Amino acid sequence: MRVKSLSFRLLVSAGLVLASFFALVSVVLEQGFRESAEQALKEKLQVHVYSLLSAGELKNSGDLIMPSNLPEPRFATPGSGLYGFIHPAKKNLIWRSPSAIGLDIALPPELRPGTMLFLLTEQGRYALHYAVIWRNVAGVEREYIFTVAEDAQFVSTQVARFRETLRAWLLALGLFLIFIQLALLRWSLKPLRIIVKDLEAIEQGGKTHLDGDYATELEGLAGNLNAFISSERAHLERYRNALADLAHSLKTPLSILRGCVESFSVNQASVKEQIFRMDEIVEYQLQRAAAKGEHKTTRTVDLSVVIKKISASLAKVYIDKNIIFDMAVPEQSLVYYEEGDLYEIAGNLIDNACKWCRSTVKVSVSVNERKGRRNFAVLLQIEDDGPGIPADKLLEILKRGVRADENIHGHGIGMAVVYELVGLLDGLLEGKKSETLGGMKWCVYLS
């Protein structure tokens, strides 16, 4: 088990808590047992005091006589650990048991008749003092203090034995609880191990997302991780697509440059314009590849200017077809979009129209269009008089790498780029047959 693991930290924490708890429990139980043993000894000494009282006899002369044979044999055995003493009130000792030969005991400062005092003496003995007023049948009355003492070893031995037993049981119980805690930790942290295993499977390509039945507390984490994984994959896919889009976007400027090579001096302005346009395309595609969401801008772009530039450039590319451009474009149509997006959308659609048309391409722009599309403010329509695209293939050509006719030169990503950009801009792309030219008609609704 590694030091940095959660299981190790939780196990150590639980072990420290258990050790502290058992230490406190040991102290409390030991103290409780000691008090219980002392109380039992006090009651035992009290019985011995009563036995001495019953054995003694007060003579009419006032002398107290104690028999040689006492009820408790230990009083008669020297060093037995049980000792008896009798003191007259505030006077010197008058009797000690044979077991207490050579020993003495200090009296408490004050002790009223009829009361008992149990304490631990400086000599390490437990003593019970009992003050009484003794009157015999003749009416002779004396005040005595009966004291019975026992070595503290009796209690110490019991406490030591109890301590050893208690510590052994607490140690065994602690190890058992730590084992239980370890099992519970493994069971409790199992959902984390499952999600880690699934993440490793995703890293190795065995899974695409976290799809396990996770604990309730981990569902939010799993959802966020799935969102992050999807975002990163989409970002990577955008990078890949952007490289393909970049190559596709540079195709038209390169075609124009190729046509201008033979007469460079005449077409010098066009060459410079296309080089500038290629630089803009590279910058735009790199920005779009790094983007994480929809493009937003607060700067207006004139869509009419963009369309006129594209049409003029494509007229040179397809000069051999003598294409007639029917332009229904306002003098100015300001929109709030990125210029690069408009070049990509309009450029790909007009380029496809030029590629497929026989002789005519029609481009129209309507600003603030609300007919049938109330949520869209700009409508761009591009038509041609070519053969058109069958309705069953309209959805297919919006996929990358799919072309309507494999005999026509192209990469099959132009319409996919247009479809993706229109979607990012919350727009709508529609394809259908042109009513006026008979070929293909593309309608781009932008909000």
Image (spheres, helix red, strand yellow):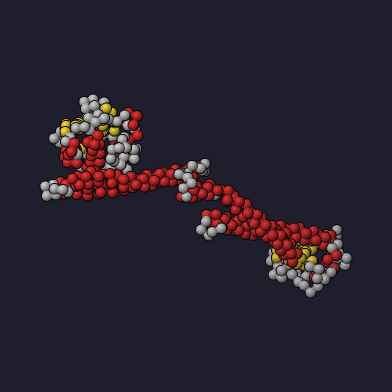
Q: Nearer the viewer, residue 248 or 222?
A: 248
Q: Which residue is drawn at 74% across and 66% down?
A: 153
Above or below, 362 relative to 414: above
Residue 33 percent coordinates (x, y): 70, 58
Is any atom of residue 76 visible in this view? yes
In this rendering, the count of numbered labels is: 0
Q: Quadrant of the C terminus?
A: top left
Q: Nearer the viewer, residue 150 or 423?
A: 423
Residue 132 percent coordinates (x, y): 77, 60
Q: Quadrant of the N terminus?
A: bottom right
Is any atom of residue 333 visible in this view? no
Residue 195 placement, left or right of 229: right
Residue 172 percent coordinates (x, y): 67, 57
In the rendered image, which quarter is residue 364 located in?
top left
In the rendered image, which quarter is residue 392 located in?
top left
Q: Which residue is drawn at 69% across and 60% down?
A: 168
